[in-house]
């Protein structure tokens, strides 16, 4: 079993729909990242959170440390939101003063006009 | 402020050869991390450098190595290339460590024939 599991793996929706992508992890973490990767490979860091909720524009990220679960929500989705969304956790196992990043497999989101 | 740059963007090599990839972090950033992305394995952490020292390493064979220079620029080297090394190699920089937000470069797409 992977340390970080995302669901769904693929998601297709119509423009305007409310989108939820889930991330569950099995290790102790110090923080969780949500990343966005567009076709062509460029990755953008959307959120870094260790508790509660963060909002940026139409994007909202929540995390429940006790349940080891995080969600990324997109309100009023738009075709330009089409991308792969990746959850990554910073493991609490500290090696040589740094912490290891472990990634989920990603969720491919397609928003149709 | 200029973003993270990686050179070259595309590279084709044959089995057995070696390759060196370069990453220039955002000015002022001292931490550089390297990641490998393949369709089968997704994103995997290779290593992190901070102030010219490798602080953390992922589960990759010794053929994968790196270094960081005094100006924080980093290089990654892969020796004795195998077909399975074909991947998108991404670097990311942050101000101090994996604890901080990571800014990703566009990646180098390596194809091994």
Image (cartoon, grey):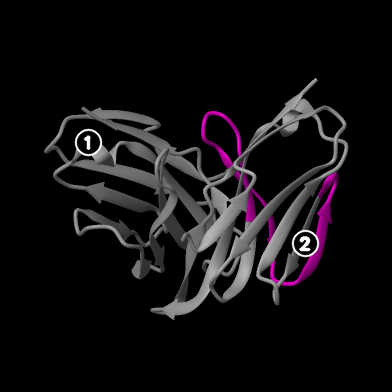
Relative horizontal placement of residue A19, taking residue A12 as reference (left or right): right
Q: Which residues are magenta?
A: A34-59
Q: CA distance from mark 1 to mark 2?
A: 39 Å
Q: Quadrant of the C terminus of chain B?
A: top left
Q: Residue at x 14, y 44 (%)?
A: B80
Chain on which label 1 sits:
B
Q: Nearer the viewer, residue B74 or B46?
A: B46
Q: Main secondary structure of the magenta part?
A: strand
Callout 1: helix, strand or loop? helix
Q: Which residue is mark 2?
A: A62
**Can see residue B78?**
yes
Q: Nearer the viewer, residue A53 or B68?
A: A53
Residue A50 lies in the magenta stretch: yes
Q: Which residue is mark 1?
A: B83
Image spot of residue A63 (x, y percent): 74, 66
Residue B85's place in the image compared with A26, above or below, is above
Relative horizontal placement of residue B35, taking residue B26 as reference (left or right): left
Tell how many labels.
Answer: 2
Image spot of residue B84 (x, y percent): 26, 40
Q: Residue furthest top?
A: A113
């Amino acid at each position: 079993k992977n340390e970080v599991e995302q669901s769904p793996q693929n998601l297709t929706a119509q423009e305007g729909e409310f989108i939820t992508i889930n991330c569950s992890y099995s290790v102790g973490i110090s923080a969780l990242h949500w990343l966005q990767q567009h076709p062509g490979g460029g990755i953008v860091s959307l959120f870094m959170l260790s508790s509660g909720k963060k909002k940026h524009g139409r994007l909202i990220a929540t995390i429940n440390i006790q349940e080891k679960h995080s969600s990324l929500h997109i309100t009023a989705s738009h075709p330009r939101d089409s991308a792969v969304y990746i959850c990554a956790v910073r493991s609490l196992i500290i090696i040589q003063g740094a912490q290891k990043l472990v990634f989920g497999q990603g969720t491919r989101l397609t928003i149709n006009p | 402020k200029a973003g993270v740059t990686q050179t070259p963007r595309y590279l084709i090599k044959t089995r057995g050869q070696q390759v060196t990839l370069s990453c220039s972090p955002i000015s002022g950033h001292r931490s550089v991390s390297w990641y490998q992305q393949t369709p089968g394995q997704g994103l995997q952490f290779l290593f992190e450098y901070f102030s010219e020292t490798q602080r953390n390493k992922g589960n990759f064979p010794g053929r994968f190595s790196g270094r960081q220079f005094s100006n924080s620029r980093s290089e990654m080297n892969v020796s004795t290339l195998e077909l399975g090394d074909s991947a998108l190699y991404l670097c990311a920089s942050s101000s101090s460590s994996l604890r901080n937000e990571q800014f990703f470069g566009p990646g180098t797409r390596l194809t091994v024939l």
